[in-house]
Amino acid sequence: MSILPASVVTPEPRPGSVLFARLSSSLAGCLIAALLGAAVFTPAANAADTPPNIVLIYADDLGYGDVSCNGATELATPNIDRIAKAGVRFTDAHCSAATCTPSRFALLTGQYAFRQKGTGILRGNANLIITPGSVTLPSLLQEAGYTTAVVGKWHLGLGEGKVDWNQVVQPGPNQIGFDYHFLIPATGDRVPCVYLEQGRVVDLDPADPIQVSYGERIDPSPSGAEARETLKQDWSHGHNQTIVNGISRIGWMTGGQAARWVDEDMADVITHKAVEFIDDHKEEPFFLFFSTHDIHVPRVPHSRFAGKSGMGPRGDAIVQLDWCVGQVLDRLQQLDLDDNTLVIFSSDNGPVLDDGYEDFANEKLGDHQPSGDLRAGKYSAFEGGTRVPMVLQWPAKVPAGQVSDALFGQVDLAATLAALAGVKVPDGACGDSRNELDTLLGEDATGRPHLVHEAGALSLRMGKWKFVPPQRTRDHLGPWQRISIDPPGALYDTEADRGEQNNLAAEHPEQLEKMRDLLQQLRRK
Ligand code: NG6
Ligand code: CA
């Protein structure tokens, strides 16, 4: 497909897209307040008078140490650092899981993913795992009058039953609170390798229908295993089925030739869509979930970023990611929206080097430390699995230049942003999500008392303590070795020992037991 998709589908104006009209249908109480002349939004005492726009930029597989504001010296991320300088940089913020799907599930539903079966890494033809019509982060913001969009990686499943990619694919984001979507349906390394806009494959030629399979081989053309010498980037593990754009993927796909993406253009395409959404909705409160492909595999940045980091494709993808962030920040400034827009930047799990393609991420790493001083990364129960970069700015409200060591969990964004927008989370919804608005705005130095960490098995943070129950887990950034944590599990003091080197289980059995019990309780909640 062309560099920038020609078809620009703007979301249908929702009935009552005018803020007050929407509120009147959904928030009778607030309407009365409005009639009385009070501010319609009665958010937490701390919030600004007008609800801010909210832009959540969500990187993929970006480690704590992959950004220069967290100490990286071998590459620079000036735009991500710009956010940190303008607002708050968190040193102890976590996604919910050490892989993508469960982290994103928790972020959007306010519920730990381990509570629902089938929330592990999804195939590219998996069905939607969030119940249509349920209360979600975007649906709460819709309720508050925001126009909501997700642009970029999804990986939460689509449709029900056997997905027909040649029809409108639903249920999807529109059924769980997003007015608009432009998606990479699963991941860059999984078929189907096409964009989906408002449920439709972009640039699909009906004469060349798409078929997708994760079992039976349906693609007779040479696979990545068979035509290895033709590949633009070789695979190292898995990723050897259908070839798209010279790169072989997980899964089989036929048809949709005109709709297939070009990896090198992906950052441009989705950034264009993200910025376009901002342009189209500059007059109303909006929520943009901009979910980047970078720096997930396959790492194939545009030629203008190739070679820029000196660290091979993984470093170049970080440079590209930072450019995407800069584009969004620049446009907010150009439109004079930056002052009252809350921009949050974070990642869906920790870093990985070899994640299945020969992109020399290990070989070209040099002195760079993707996890900083944390232990391990993606897939791991150690802190590197979920402690990720998180920076935010909201110039109208949040003083610049803050550093927060509070424990923060992305699972709290649903309740926290709902509080910011002035809507009540219905009883029983978003059950693991706490209103941590004061933590988010840098006003509470402690944050959450405890936080579950999912990496297949569960671990637990409680204040400075980290408990890793007996399990096998990753202790490397790829490839594939695992280590065993033996009974009764490991206990670390993450304040004195950020790198989790000293197992204190024998010295503090009572602490370990307390945390084992709490984890049991939280599991059963
Ligand atoms: C793994 C893939 C990896 C990546 C991951 C999901 C192989 C060998 N590994 O199964 O490449 O796609 O799934 O990453 O196939 S995530 O960030 O979306 O969770
Ligand atoms: Ca990820």
Image: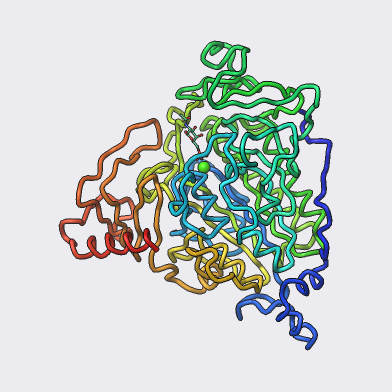
* x 81%, y 63%: residue: 17
* x 69%, y 59%: residue: 287
Give the side of residue 234 with respect to residue 323, left or right. left
Dividing the picture into quadrants, the one containing residue 278 is bottom right
Task: Pinpoint residue 429: horizontal percent, then vertical percent.
Answer: 55, 65
* x 56%, y 18%: residue: 217
Residue extending farthest to the front is 161
Give the side of residue 369 with respect to residue 10, left or right. left
Q: Residue 173 versus residue 492: which sits nearer the camera?
A: 173
In the displayed structure, would residue 398 be above or below residue 318? below
Dividing the picture into quadrants, the one containing residue 396 is bottom right
In the displayed structure, would residue 218 be above or below residue 109? above
Task: Pinpoint residue 95: horizontal percent, then vertical percent.
Answer: 48, 53
Dividing the picture into quadrants, the one containing residue 477 is top left
Give the side of residue 344 with respect to residue 61, left or right. right
Residue extending farthest to the left is 506
Report how many numbered discs are placed on residues in the image: 0
Task: Pinpoint residue 234: horizontal percent, then vertical percent.
Answer: 52, 20
In the displayed structure, would residue 404 be above or below residue 479? below
Task: Pinpoint residue 502: horizontal percent, then vertical percent.
Answer: 23, 52
Image quadrant in which the C terminus is located: bottom left
Q: Residue 17 versus residue 229: which sits nearer the camera?
A: 17
Give the side of residue 503 with respect to residue 284, left or right. left
Q: Residue 344 versus residue 217: which sits nearer the camera?
A: 217
In the displayed structure, would residue 113 be above or below residue 1? below
* x 78%, y 35%: residue: 4
Image quadrant in which the N terminus is located: top right
